[in-house]
Image (cartoon, rainbow, N blue to C red):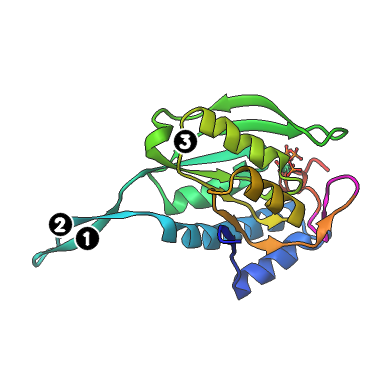
């Protein structure tokens, strides 16, 4: 899969282990998730186009760079919020849109309950954030909503993904790169990723 990027390094592997561990407390879970997000944003930024600019050092003029496109982060509520701060730390001038999607636990289909994004999506690089790519229903719907509003340069970023979700997203949105820090075995009959880490939203916000 050309557009699938499994981002791995020893720090990510250690932190994914913290996330998987059912004994990990909420504050440890949040911190590990934040650290993984820094590695992800660093990897994703390799896709950012740069423009050359001139910069005056205290001694002379030299070549510098600025990021060409406006970056728009779009966390999928609620769990996607847990990734936003790390991304903003690294891209302080990013704008942030929000999409509220909840998976109907019986049909496993995404239901939208909120949508608000910055203008000019068609001129921005839009990074959709959601820690989990399970069936791919939510991610696929989020990307479709954004495309309907003009987004044409999209990236999807998650922490953990299942083959079923990656397959669905690659089929429905083949041009959208997928970044993930873990690629797991399969989904169970309830649509949970195995071995997984449970529900990232519940574990981040303590709503188990
Ligand atoms: C989880 C997760 C994704 C979605 C993934 O959200 O954060 O948004 O499920 O599942 P899918 O790939 O099968 O669509 P959930 O509905 O639990 O809401 P939450 O963010 O409020 O925890």
Who comes first in sequence, dot 2 or dot 3?
2
Residues under numbered marks 3 and 1 in contact, where contact means CB atoms less than 8 Å apart: no
The residue to which callout 2 is attached is: 54
The residue to which callout 1 is attached is: 64
Vertical placement of residue 88 versus 196, above or below: above
Who comes first in sequence, dot 3 or dot 1?
1
Image region (quadrant) for ligand 1: top right
By secondary structure, the bulk of the magenta-drawn segment is best described as loop
Residues under numbered marks 2 and 1 in contact, where contact means CB atoms less than 8 Å apart: yes
Q: Is 196 or 179 nearer to us in this picture?
A: 179
Q: Secondary structure at mark 1?
A: strand
Left or right placement of residue 181 versus residue 108 in this view: left
Task: Tell me where the magenta segment starts and ends, as one range.
Answer: 189-197
Left or right placement of residue 125 versus residue 111 in this view: left
* Ligand 1 neighbours mark 2 (CB distance < 8 Å): no
- Residue 93 is inside the magenta segment: no
Who comes first in sequence, dot 2 or dot 1?
2
Measure the alpha-carbon separation of dots 2 and 1. 5 Å
The residue to which callout 3 is attached is: 151
Vertical placement of residue 74 versus 58, above or below: above
Measure the alpha-carbon separation of dots 3 and 1. 28 Å
Residue found at x 78% / y 61%: 20
Residue 68 placed where, x, y %? 31, 48
Left or right placement of residue 181 versus residue 104 in this view: left
Numbered badge on residue 14: none
Please identify the quarter of the rendering in which residue 182 is found: bottom right
């Amino acid at each position: 899969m050309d557009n699938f990027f499994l981002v791995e390094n020893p720090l990510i592997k250690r932190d994914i282990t913290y996330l998987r561990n059912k004994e990990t407390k909420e504050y440890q879970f949040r911190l590990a998730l934040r650290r993984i997000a820094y590695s992800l944003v660093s990897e994703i930024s390799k896709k950012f186009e740069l423009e050359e600019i001139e910069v005056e050092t205290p001694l002379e003029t030299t070549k510098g760079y600025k990021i060409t496109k406006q970056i728009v982060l779009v966390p999928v509520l609620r769990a996607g919020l847990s990734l936003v701060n790390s991304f903003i730390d690294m891209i302080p001038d990013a704008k942030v849109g929000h999409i509220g999607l909840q998976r109907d636990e019986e049909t496993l289909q995404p239901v939208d309950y909120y949508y608000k994004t910055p203008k000019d999506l068609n001129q921005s690089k839009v990074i959709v954030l959601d820690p989990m790519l399970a069936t791919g229903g939510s991610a696929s719907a989020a990307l479709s909503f954004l495309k309907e509003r003009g987004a044409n340069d999209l990236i999807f970023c998650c922490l953990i993904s299942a083959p079923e979700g990656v397959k669905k997203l690659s089929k429905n949105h083949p041009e959208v790169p997928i970044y993930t820090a873990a690629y797991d075995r399969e989904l169970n009959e309830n649509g949970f990723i195995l071995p997984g880490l449970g529900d990232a939203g519940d574990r981040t916000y303590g709503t188990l």
